Image (cartoon, rainbow, N blue to C red):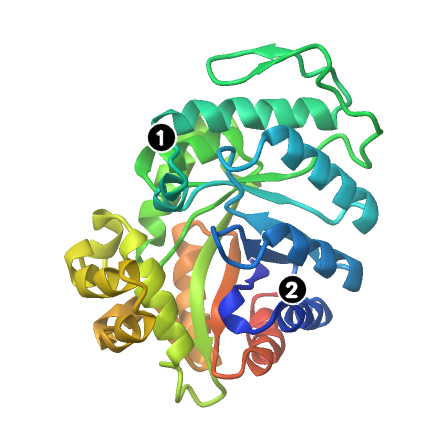
Amino acid sequence: MRFSVRLIQHLGTPREVVNLAVLADQMGFDQAWFPSDKFMYNAWSIIAAVAENTENIVVGANGTEPYAISPAEIAAFMATLDHLSQGRVAIGFGMHTEKMVNWLGHDTSDRLQRITEACDLMRRLWRGENAQFDGDVYHWSDQCYMRFKPFRDAIPIYVSGFADDDLELSGVLGDGSLPMVTPPESASLQAERILRGVRKAGKDPTEFDICGCAWFSVTEDGQGTMTDTLKDVLAYFGHYMDEETLATVGLSQASFAETQRHVDAGDYAAARAAVTPEMAQLAITGSPKDAIAKIEMLADAGVTQVSIGGPLGPDPAAAIRLIGEKVIPYFR
C-alpha cells in the first residue's frame, strides 16, 4: 500500500498548506495532491511551491479538467514543473463532479471524448511529437509542439471520475485512477468500475494504481475528530456523491438536501450546523487503529494507494505525524 496526502484550502493559508506537504515528505508519504477546485486556492501555485520545498514526494494537481484550461497549457505546465522537480510530478486529470465546470457555462456532455483526446494530446507533447490533430473535440494545427525538451517523455496521468462510465474510462486511459472512496465502504464499487476499464484496455490489473481519495480525521485517542473542518467538507462535497455510492452506508443525495441548500445560498455556517453524525460515515475517523482497519478494507477492495485527504484531524500537522509514525509503517 502506498500513501499520499491530499491537501485542501480548509487546512490553512497557502503557506501553511505547503508546510503540511513538506511535513508529509519528511514522514515518508509517497505523493502530495492538491485539488483543482473552482474559486479555491489555485492548485498550480500550490504544487509548484510544494515541489520547490520538498525532496522526495511526488506532487500533483487532482481534478484538473480540459474545460477551464487547455491540455496544451496543462502539458506545458507539467513538463516545466517536471524539470524543476527533477521528475517528481503526476497529474490528476478529469472530474469528481460536473457541477463546478457547469458553473462556468460549459456543457460537459462530451467529457468522455474530451478527456480521451486531451490525454492523447498531452502524451504526444511530452514525447516530443508534433501534436497536429483533427478530432471530435480538438482541432490543432501543425504548430502544436513543445518548444523545449521535456524532462521525461511520460508523466503519469491519474484519471479522475465520478460516474460509472467516467471511472471505467479512467481504467482505460490512466496510468492510475483517483476515485473518491467516500464512504470507504464504496471502495469495492469504485474499484470494479475502474477495473472494467483496465481489463477492457488489456492492462495488467496488478500494475494499475487505484489511488482511493478518502477524508480522514484522526487523533491519538480517537476523540474530537468531528471537527468544524470535517463538517465543512461533508457539507460542501457530500452531495456530489452518486446514489449508489451513498447507499453503501444507508445514505442518499436526499440526506444532503439541507446542507446543499445552505451551500448553494452561500450560508456555510448553516450548512455546517446541518451536518448529521450519519454523514460522518463518509470519512475515516478515530484513532490510528481505526484508520488501519478502514485502510485494510480499502486494500481488500483493490485500492493500491490511499490518498489521505483533509481535514486530517483537529491538528493537521499532528495527524500527518501520527499517520507517518503509526499507520504507514503498519503497511510496509
Disc number for residue 107: 1
Among the 4 quarters of the image, the one containing residue 287: bottom left
Q: Earlier in the sequence, mark 1 or mark 2?
A: 2
In-image side of 169 versus 109 (left or right): right
The answer to whether residue 198 of the structure is visible from this angle is: no
In the rendered image, residue 307, in percent from the top left (x then y), is placed at 52, 59
Residue type, numbered disc 2: Phe
Quadrant of the frame with the C terminus: bottom right
Q: Compute the Cα span from label 1 to label 2.
A: 37 Å
- For the point 45% across and 90% down, which residue is it? 221
The answer to whether residue 15 of the structure is visible from this angle is: yes
- For the point 67% across and 70% down, which residue is it? 15
Task: Look at the numbered disc 2 and give the secondary structure of its residue.
Answer: loop
In-image side of 203 versus 47 (left or right): left
Above or below, comparing residue 161 to residue 231 in the picture = above
In this rendered view, identify the residue nearer to me: 41 or 283. Answer: 41
Disc number for residue 280: none
In-image side of 99 versus 89 (left or right): left
In the rendered image, residue 244, in percent from the top left (x then y), is placed at 22, 48
Q: Which residue is mark 2?
A: 29
- For the point 71% across and 40% down, which residue is it? 77
In the rendered image, residue 50, in percent from the top left (x then y), is placed at 71, 60
Query: Mark 1 against mark 2, which lies toward the viewer?
Result: 1
Task: Look at the numbered disc 1 and give the secondary structure of its residue.
Answer: loop
Estimate how packed mark 1 is, as few (under 14), some (14 to 19) or many (20 or more) residues with alpha carbons within 10 Å.
Answer: few
Among the 4 quarters of the image, the one containing residue 186: bottom left
- For the point 57% across and 80% down, which residue is it? 322
Residue type, numbered disc 1: Asp
Among the 4 quarters of the image, the one containing residue 98: top left
Above or below, comparing residue 53 to residue 168 in the picture = below
In the rendered image, residue 147, in percent from the top left (x then y), is placed at 82, 25
